[in-house]
Image (cartoon, grey):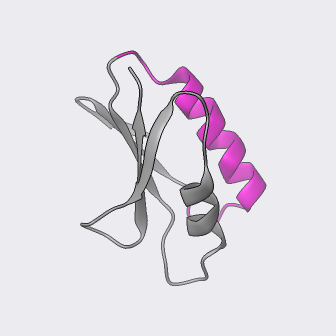
């Protein structure tokens, strides 16, 4: 996981769906106050299971989940601060 300003970046390439969702739940819960978004890199060449799971992901801290307009192998999770 890398951090730039108010954005966290998580790469879940090659993970099983349940493991990826567990990691996302943990990172969302531990994201510092002031973090606005988490960019999740799931890839797109090897199926859609991770992408679909991330795009259905919700917790009370999640405001919105949207595809990245920059890279189709990424999804952006917007957070409440």
Q: Is residue 19 left or right of residue 9?
A: right
- Looking at the picture, tell me which residue is in the foreground, 44 or 15: 44
**Residue 15 picture location, percent across and down:** 67, 61
Q: Residue at x 27, y 29 (%)?
A: 6
Q: Residue furthest right?
A: 18
**Residue 54 picture location, percent across and down:** 58, 56
**Residue 14 sits above or below residue 44 on the image:** above
Q: Residue at x 58, y 24 (%)?
A: 29
Which quarter of the figure is the N terminus placed in? top left
**Residue 22 sits above or below residue 79 on the image:** below
Q: What residue range appears in magenta?
A: 12-33
Q: Is-magenta flag for residue 43? A: no
Magenta residues, dominant SS class: helix
**Residue 64 picture location, percent across and down:** 43, 44
Q: Residue at x 72, y 60 (%)?
A: 17
**Residue 27 sits above or below residue 41 on the image:** above
Where residue 3 sits, quadrant-wise, is top left
**Number of numbered labels in the structure image:** 0
**Residue 67 picture location, percent across and down:** 39, 63
Q: Residue at x 54, y 31 (%)?
A: 28
Q: Is residue 6 left or right of residue 1?
A: left
Which quarter of the figure is the C terminus placed in? top left
- Looking at the picture, tell me which residue is in the foreground, 17 or 67: 67
- Looking at the picture, tell me which residue is in the foreground, 67 or 40: 67
């Amino acid at each position: 996981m890398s951090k730039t300003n108010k954005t966290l970046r998580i790469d879940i390439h090659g993970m099983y769906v349940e493991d990826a969702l567990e990691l996302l739940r943990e990172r969302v819960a531990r994201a510092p106050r002031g973090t606005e978004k988490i960019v999740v890199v799931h890839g797109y060449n090897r199926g859609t299971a991770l992408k679909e799971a991330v795009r259905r992901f919700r917790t009370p801290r999640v405001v919105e989940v949207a595809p990245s307009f920059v890279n189709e192998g990424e999804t952006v999770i917007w957070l409440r601060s």
